[in-house]
Image: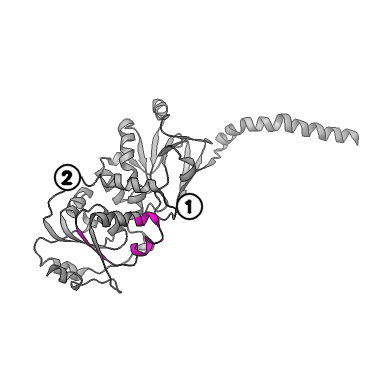
């Protein structure tokens, strides 16, 4: 009986002194062989105290969760704050990917204010490391048009990556549905606007209507907005225009058209937020008053956007219970 007891103690001691330390030492190798990833959580208010960027090696997958956290699956257990090590990774010819897409990347307004807002800063990375690619979870027409506006070509945008990689993650402070206030977002919003206000054109369009687009709309927010009567009415008004963003040849054309207009008619929600954000010294007629007016009361970042727009433009909301807008909603203004 004593022998069995001593044998158990021996095995317990061996496990504690040799087996467990050996396992801890070999654990990274075992993970690598099994392709068993670590889970890394990068939180806006904790993981990014001094930088806009963090580097994670050998990323397998990621998702944007709870609006201010990246959950990353990677074969390396740690992240590095800042971009100081990027030169070393580039010298090793490791593929470099810049992660942009957040939780609602397939919703135009979210992608514009959560992902594209980082592009001015990312351009500097691409300039210094031209081999780097922007990774998107899904290629969309609006993503490619906006990135092209910033000089990013189609071959610099990818929707897949190799595992032996270096991924750059941005500080997740820009989620519009995050109810936490973040002053950094307000600063970024002002910096982002400077990308669109260079050389404002003369205002030679009296009234501009942007009907709600039908392509690539976010499913749960998709809705029909009737503007046929408004389109017929504007065709009778000199120097007025209907601009359908579904058929826009480029994002630059859309911006020029907006900034050339004295009066702009645009539907409530992301079409208003994005198009009015790029406008200046115009009268904005918002077709609908149920989305952003209510959302701005709940979400601080959406309120920042509305305040920014109202600082640069005159905004009036037009109500219609059935989402059909007739010429009478602006005829008094025209007369």
For numbered disc 2, what is the local secondary structure? loop
Crowd rating for badge 2 (residues with CA inside 10 Å; few <14, some 14–19, many 20+): few
- Residue 43 is situated, as x and y percent measured from the top left of the image, at 48, 45
Vertically, is 300 above or below 31? below
> In which image quadrant can residue 36 be found?
top right
Q: Report the side of 6 relative to 49 (left or right).
A: right
Q: Is residue 243 magenta?
A: no
Vertically, is 329 above or below 146? below
Question: Which residue was labeled with disc 1?
Answer: 66
Q: Quadrant of the C terminus?
A: bottom left
Nearest the eye: 161 or 148: 148
- Residue 316 is situated, as x and y percent measured from the top left of the image, at 25, 65
Residue 199, disc: 2
- Residue 51 is situated, as x and y percent measured from the top left of the image, at 42, 37
Residue 232, disc: none
Q: Quadrant of the N terminus?
A: top right
Crowd rating for badge 1 (residues with CA inside 10 Å; few <14, some 14–19, many 20+): few
Q: Report the side of 299 relative to 224 (left or right).
A: right
Q: How many marks?
A: 2
Q: Is residue 292 magenta?
A: yes
Q: Report the side of 76 relative to 207 (left or right).
A: right
For numbered disc 1, what is the local secondary structure? loop
> In which image quadrant can residue 236 be found?
bottom left
- Residue 233 is situated, as x and y percent measured from the top left of the image, at 14, 69
Counting residues from the start of the chain, the first of labels 2 and 1 encountered is: 1
**Which residue corresponds to the image point at 11% horizontal and 55% vertical from the top-left?**
204
**Which residue corresponds to the image point at 13% horizontal and 68% vertical from the top-left?**
334
**Which residue corresponds to the image point at 37% horizontal and 54% vertical from the top-left?**
301
* Coloring scheme used: one colour
Give the residue at the far left of this rendering. Answer: 238
User: Magenta residues, as a range?
Assistant: 282-303
* CA distance separating discs 2 and 1: 39 Å
């Amino acid at each position: 009986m004593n022998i069995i007891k001593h044998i158990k103690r021996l095995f317990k001691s061996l496990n504690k002194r040799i087996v467990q330390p050996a396992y801890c030492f070999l654990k990274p190798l075992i993970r690598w062989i099994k392709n068993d990833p670590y889970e890394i959580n990068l939180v806006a208010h904790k993981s990014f105290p001094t930088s806009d960027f963090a580097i994670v090696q050998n990323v397998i997958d990621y998702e944007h969760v709870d609006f201010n956290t990246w959950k990353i699956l990677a074969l390396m257990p740690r992240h590095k704050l800042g971009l100081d090590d990027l030169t070393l990774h580039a010298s090793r010819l490791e593929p470099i990917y810049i992660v942009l897409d957040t939780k609602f990347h397939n919703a135009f307004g979210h992608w514009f204010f959560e992902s594209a807002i980082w592009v001015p800063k990312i351009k500097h990375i691409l300039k210094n490391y031209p081999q780097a690619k922007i990774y998107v979870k899904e290629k969309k027409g609006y993503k490619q048009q906006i990135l092209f506006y910033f000089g990013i070509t189609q071959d610099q945008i990818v929707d897949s990556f190799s595992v032996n990689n270096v991924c750059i993650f941005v500080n997740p402070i820009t989620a519009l549905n995050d109810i936490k206030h973040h002053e950094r977002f307000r600063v970024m919003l002002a910096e982002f606007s400077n990308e669109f206000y260079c050389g404002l054109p003369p205002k030679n369009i009296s009234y501009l209507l942007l009907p709600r687009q039908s392509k690539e709309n976010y499913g749960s927010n998709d809705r029909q907005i009737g503007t046929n009567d408004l389109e017929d009415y504007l065709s009778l008004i000199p120097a007025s225009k209907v601009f359908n963003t579904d058929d826009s040849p480029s994002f630059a054309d859309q911006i020029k058209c907006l900034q050339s207009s004295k009066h702009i008619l645009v539907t409530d929600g992301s079409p208003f937020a994005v198009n009015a954000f790029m406008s200046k010294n115009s009268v904005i007629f918002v077709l609908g008053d149920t989305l952003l007016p209510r959302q701005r009361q709940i979400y601080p970042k959406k309120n920042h956007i509305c305040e920014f727009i109202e600082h640069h433009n005159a905004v009036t909301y037009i109500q219609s219970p059935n989402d059909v807008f007739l010429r009478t909603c602006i005829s008094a203004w025209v007369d």
